[in-house]
Amino acid sequence: MSLLNNLFGGKIDSDGAFKDIASKVDDSKFTLEEQSRFEMAKADKQAEFYEKSKDENTIRSKSRRFATYLVLINFFVSFWMVVALYIYGKTEAAIFVKDLAVEWKLVAAFFAVIVFFFSGYYVMKSIEKFKKK
């Protein structure tokens, strides 16, 4: 308590503080009419958000697909480049490209994309099978 006294320069009126807090909490309670208006406004906002985001052509969906294509293209180009360089006898270049792909963590990014896009489907199918049992 002495620390608080030192901070605030004297005694603290705890009863007054609790009364102030209680009055603010009482003021924040909604009447039934206020609560129903709030819920209707919230429902309108949720419906508006759903209408905007239900389409798969939102900017976020397009950018997610574009990032996915970049990861997949980088992975497969690097993979086939390493294979081609080994076939043509350029092992040092192949090792360099492989090390570069490992450094960029392309394999981890590739599997992250695969899991992100396909795991939801298989999880839902597994849940349906589990519920049927």
Image (spheres, rainbow, N blue to C red):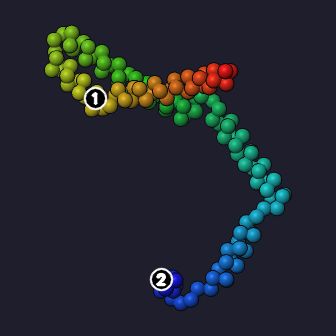
Residue under label 1: 102
Residue 13 relative to residue 66: left or right: right
Residue 54 relative to residue 102: left or right: right
Viewer-proximal residue among 44 and 120: 120
Residue under label 2: 3
x and y percentages locating residue 89 in the rendered image = 16, 11
Q: Secondary structure at mark 2?
A: helix
Q: Residue furthest top?
A: 87
Type of the residue with mark 2: Leu
Q: Residue furthest bottom?
A: 10
Residue 23 relative to residue 118: left or right: right
Sequence order check, earlier mark of 1 and 2: 2
x and y percentages locating residue 21 in the rendered image = 67, 74
* Residue for point 76% across, 64% down: 29
Corner quadrant of residue 102: top left
Viewer-proximal residue among 71 and 130: 130
Residue 80 relative to residue 129: left or right: left
Q: Is residue 25 above or below residue 106?
A: below
Type of the residue with mark 1: Val
Q: Is residue 22 above or below residue 79?
A: below
| Labelled disc at residue 83 | none
Other-residue count near label 2 (Cα within 10 Å), few / some / many at <14 / 14–19 / ≥20: few
